[in-house]
Amino acid sequence: MESKRQVSVEPTPLQGEAYSTLPRDGAALNGHRPQVMDAERFHDASERILGSINKVIDGKADAAKLALTVLLAQGHLLLEDVPGVGKTLLAKTLARTVDCTVSRIQFTPDLLPSDVTGVSIYNQSSRQFEFRPGAVFANIVIGDEINRASAKTQSALLECMEEHQVTVDGHSYQLGLPFMVVATQNPIEMEGTYPLPEAQRDRFMARISMGYPDKEAEIEMLETHQASSPLAKVTPVVTAADVAAMIAAVQQVYVSTAIKEYTVAIGRATRDSARLRLGASPRSLLQLLRAAKATAALDGRDFVLPDDVVDVAESVLAHRIILDRKAASSGDTPQSILRGILAALPVAQEPPNAWRRDRHTA
């Protein structure tokens, strides 16, 4: 009987070929360290990407910017909202703006871990086992309705999301750069779903709730999306090498000691909160700072401000913290508690140039 598992992979150099273990520098692209993109080219490339996304996703400029922020911060994105608000469309549009390999996995209850990671197959002609890569071997991996697969299949993504590698039969296979997992899930459909465990959610740098578009955006959608899919007109505006150079530029963004202390203070405040059963992990603070650096770069700065941390704090931390029973029963949400923590937490008052001065004196 033919399998009903749905795994679609767009053409990639790995498909249909034996794949061997290859050592890879974490910052390398095709064996070469990418050049840092200058500020003018960075601004131009980011505007092209955001412009292409905003032509397809009406009225969701903030979601588009956050998705690009996660890509440049080398993170992974979880799109969570009710059906029909454009979660998969945003993921596909982001993927198509970059000229790189893309794969899409439709998560279903009968999906196996080997469908995601790959499997070793015995080659009778060579009398050796050859590794056939799974759908995860792409620059951008779209996981549609990730919570419909079993926990065993969900866990197949843990290693590749954290370490950018896949281990099968005792051999580790490195993934390329850039590498990003964009997963979607519908929180209201509980039958036939497997909620993401805390360890899986913690691998996602940010979570976006799309929300309904406003009246004008919805009317515009009805006028422009009837005849054909807006994805048909989306073409790559940057290459994978351009994205790697943009990532290298984000890594060069300066973070002062005061910003690091402020980030740690946010994390410790969540752990000390009486209304939270689980606070922010050290990994989440590292990803918070990476997202803040990408935000600063997209705003045209080579240094991080406290506002950059605040801008992404809710998206990066809200899906990682867990309310205690009293807070949950009183109507609190992780977002509301985070807003309260950020409002109460003092920010060090520094001279206008202090956020970048330490770089020259260190």
Image (cartoon, rainbow, N blue to C red):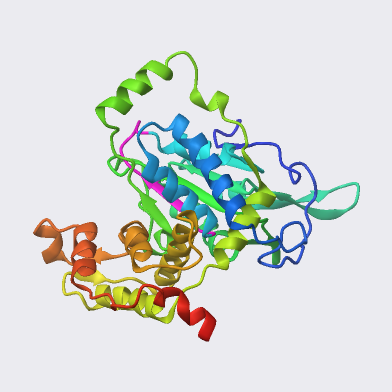
Query: Residue at 53% across / 81% down in the picture?
Result: 360
Is the residue 28 above or below the residue 7 in the image? below
In this picture, is 164 found above or below 283? above
Q: On screen, 253 above or below 42?
A: below
User: Left or right: where does residue 326 sit relative to residue 152?
Assistant: left
In the rendered image, residue 250, in percent from the top left (x then y), is placed at 55, 62
Determine if residue 212 is in view.
yes
Q: Residue farthest to the right?
A: 125
**Residue 293 counted in the magenta span:** no
Q: In the rendering, at what x and y percent does residue 195 appear? A: 35, 52
Give the prevailing secondary structure in the magenta stretch. loop
Q: Which residues are magenta?
A: 74-85
Residue pictured at 46% horizontal, 48% vertical: 67
Q: Residue 304's spot in the image, x, y percent?
A: 43, 68
User: As drawn, which residue projects farthest toward the bottom?
Assistant: 362
Query: Of residues 137 and 100, which is closer to you in this image?
Result: 100
